[in-house]
């Protein structure tokens, strides 16, 4: 029997309509999902935290508590980026520790963490803290293709993940480029070399995902991530219902409760229609794009690049930039193209082409990367390029977070007049200005009468 993790209320709407589902919608669905028989429901982390504060004027912690209340019987899962947590810099260990503690206290059972470079030193604190507070920790390996990302590379990584104390391993194919035969080889090798349960997370962006899932299932994968249709396919995960039907009666039958799924379907349909109507969900998100298999560039990165080139009036350079991406990636030591490396490599490729000379212009993040601030690159970076950009500067070789002083108490002190809980302090740590605005309004809402007076 293959187990299913339902992703519609996290990755589903994150991939299809910028994570805008409200807490009310999420809770409505989760009440039903609790009876479907899922291994877990992915409900939190990723972009949900930021979107709550920034766009929905909702407290992400209140969402988590509401979902927990609605789902007494099913495990709740979340995703975050190791030492980056959900923000855009490295946080000190005490902030990572407090974030794990509060996530588990507020209702999370399984914490999935990943690092863009597969540098496990960036996940060490997250694993230790998750275990310390009684959570299950899953480490996701960022899947990519390159001459160094061989089966042996992933098998060695899996062994290190096991040694680090993780409870399970996820193959995280964020770009949707894992091919069926490669999935067969990878899953077989991981199953042979690791005792841990293996999960597959991919996206339908390239149009091959269901074939890959089937290959992985036949090779013995334990868990797969799917999303309830119509919040599935396109840039999201394959359909929960379709996979359940495809496997029905076989030895892999996930045995989901179809009657309960039928109860959820009209609600999902209503939600999808709402976002189609208000324009946040572009029907193009449901179209597949097999070109990402040719260029090995995630869909989101392609659309970012098109926007940068359009803004510069340089769309005629599109093909040149596309050819530049694999060169930059090779020179940077083949980082997987996942946040934040996808944006960094994409932007540098644009700069290299538009700047007239390669690496004449260089983004600050690429300089930080070359200084070792993101961790160790999968393969060594090109020495000549490195020299051109950072000269003989000292490069960090230790775990980047070892250089960070504890910062939790400082943050708590800084916001002692605003934050009323550790959860508030964490919101401020992750999205400082957005959280200041949100919490100021939450605790001291501008009353209607004040506004009214302004206009009389
Ligand atoms: Co995903």
Image (tube, rainbow, N blue to C red):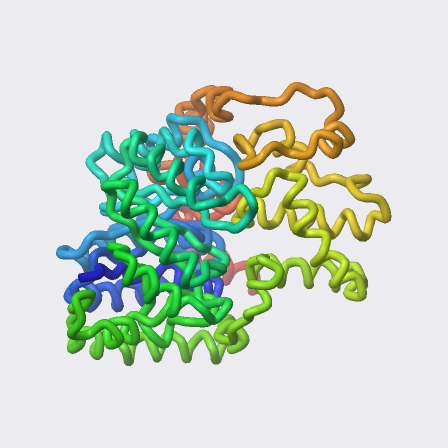
Q: Count of labels shown? A: 0
- With respect to residue 135, does 271 lie above or below? below
The quadrant of the picture occupied by the C terminus is bottom right
Q: Give me the residue at 57% from left, 63% from top.
A: 292
Q: Nearer the viewer, residue 138 or 97?
A: 138
Q: Residue furthest right?
A: 356
Spot occupied by residue 198 in the image (x, y as percentages of width and height): 29, 49
Using the rendered view, name the quadrant where residue 215 is placed: bottom left
Residue 273 in sight in this render: yes
Dividing the image into four quarters, tell me where ligand 1 lies: bottom left
Give left or right: position of 140 versus 176. left
Q: Nearer the viewer, residue 285 or 323?
A: 323
Give left or right: position of 169 versus 176. left
Residue 422 in sight in this render: no
Give left or right: position of 277 versus 131. right
Spot occupied by residue 421 in the image (x, y as percentages of width and height): 32, 36
Spot occupied by residue 393 in the image (x, y as percentages of width and height): 70, 21
Using the rendered view, name the quadrant where residue 121 is placed: top left
Q: Give me the residue at 58% from left, 49% from top.
A: 342
Q: Nearer the viewer, residue 365 or 246?
A: 246
- With respect to residue 339, does 71 lie above or below? below
Q: Give me the residue at 39% from left, 34% from top.
A: 123
Spot occupied by residue 132 in the image (x, y as percentages of width and height): 23, 30
The quadrant of the picture occupied by the N terminus is bottom left
- With respect to residue 349, does 1 lie above or below? below
Q: Give me the residue at 81% from left, 39% from top.
A: 360
């Amino acid at each position: 029997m293959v187990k299913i993790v339902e992703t519609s209320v996290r990755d589903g709407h994150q991939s299809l309509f910028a994570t805008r589902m409200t807490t009310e919608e999420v809770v409505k669905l989760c009440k039903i999902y609790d009876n479907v028989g899922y291994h877990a429901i992915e409900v939190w982390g990723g972009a949900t935290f930021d979107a709550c504060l920034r766009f929905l004027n909702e407290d992400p912690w209140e969402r988590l508590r509401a979902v927990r209340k609605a789902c007494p019987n099913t495990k709740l899962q979340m995703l975050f980026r190791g030492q980056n947590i959900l923000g855009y810099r490295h946080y000190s260990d005490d902030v990572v520790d407090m974030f794990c503690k509060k996530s588990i206290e507020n209702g999370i059972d399984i914490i999935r963490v990943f690092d863009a470079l597969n540098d496990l030193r960036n996940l060490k604190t997250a694993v230790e803290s998750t275990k310390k507070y009684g959570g299950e920790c899953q480490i996701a390996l960022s899947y990519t293709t390159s001459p160094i990302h061989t089966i042996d590379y992933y098998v060695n990584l899996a062994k290190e993940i096991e040694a680090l104390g993780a409870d399970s391993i996820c193959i995280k194919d964020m770009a949707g480029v894992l091919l069926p035969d490669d999935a067969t080889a990878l899953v077989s090798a991981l199953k042979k070399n690791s005792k841990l349960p293996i999960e597959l997370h991919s996206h339908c962006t390239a149009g091959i995902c269901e074939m890959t899932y089937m290959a992985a299932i036949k090779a013995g994968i334990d868990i797969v991530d799917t999303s309830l249709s119509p919040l599935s396919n396109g840039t999201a995960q394959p359909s929960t219902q379709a996979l359940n039907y495809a496997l029905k009666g076989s030895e892999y039958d996930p045995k989901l409760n179809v009657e309960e799924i039928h109860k959820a379907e009209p609600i999902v349909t209503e939600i999808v229609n709402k976002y189609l109507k208000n324009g946040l969900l572009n029907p193009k998100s449901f179209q597949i794009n097999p070109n990402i298999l040719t260029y090995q560039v995630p869909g989101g990165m392609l659309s970012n690049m098109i926007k940068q080139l359009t803004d510069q009036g340089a769309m005629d350079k599109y093909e040149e930039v596309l050819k530049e991406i694999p060169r930059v990636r090779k020179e940077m030591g083949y980082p997987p193209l996942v946040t934040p490396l996808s944006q960094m490599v994409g932007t540098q490729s644009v700069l290299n082409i538009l700047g007239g000379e390669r690496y004449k212009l260089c983004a600050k993040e690429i300089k930080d990367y070359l200084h070792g601030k993101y961790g160790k690159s999968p393969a060594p970076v090109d020495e000549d390029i490195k020299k051109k950009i950072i000269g003989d500067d000292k490069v960090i070789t230790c775990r980047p977070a070892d250089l960070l002083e504890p910062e939790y108490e400082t943050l708590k002190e800084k916001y002692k007049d605003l934050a009323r809980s550790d959860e508030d302090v964490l919101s401020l740590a992750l999205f400082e200005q957005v959280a200041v605005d949100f919490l100021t309004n939450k605790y001291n809402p501008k009353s209607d009468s004040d506004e009214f007076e302004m206009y009389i």
